[in-house]
Amino acid sequence: MKINDNYAIKLCVIDVDDRGVPGNVYDHYEIMRKENPEYGYRFGYYVVDLRTGLVPEACNDWNDSPEEALADYYYNCT
């Protein structure tokens, strides 16, 4: 979801270990499964700077919902 010309919110996949602890963040489900086939997963959302392709330094690596990601953007990028 594009926020403006410089930022967007994207979907990510987070691996979850057998204790339920979230770990690494991936852009693609297939890559997460290949690296951690025994882990569970959950979906998340993150803010990305379209100019660099990176998560802005002040933003979270991932958020639980699109609404939280949008709040992350407004709190840290504006």
Image (cartoon, rainbow, N blue to C red):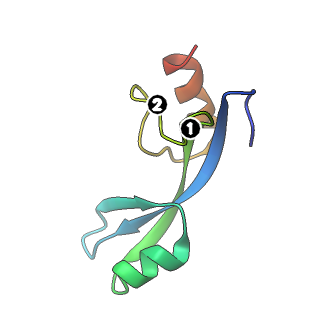
Give amino acid for label 1.
Answer: Val
Q: Quadrant of the N terminus?
A: top right
| Residue position for label 2 | 56
Which amino acid does the dot numbered 2 rest on?
A: Pro
How many numbered marks are there? 2
Quarter of the figure with residue 32 = bottom left
Distance, label 1 to label 2, CA atoms, is: 7 Å
Would you identify the image quadrant in which residue 25 lies?
Answer: bottom left
Residue reaching furthest to the front: 51
Image point (27%, 76%), residue name = 18
Please tell me whether mark 2 sits on a helix, a strand or a loop.
loop
Mark 2 packing: few (<14 Cα in 10 Å), some, or many (20+)? Answer: some
Relative horizontal placement of residue 15, taking residue 55 as reference (left or right): left
Left or right: where 27 falls relative to 66: left
Query: Circle 1 is placed at which residue position?
Result: 47
Near-viewer residue (51 or 1): 51
Q: Where is residue 54 in the image (x, y as percent from the top left)?
A: 49, 40
Residue under the image location 75 percent in, 37 percent down? 2
Label disc, if present, on residue 19 of the rendered structure: none
SS at badge 1? strand
Dot 1 and dot 2 residues touching (CB under 8 Å)? yes
Q: What residue appears at the point 74 percent right and 27 percent down from the top-left corner? A: 5
Q: Could you tell me which quadrant the C terminus lies in?
A: top right
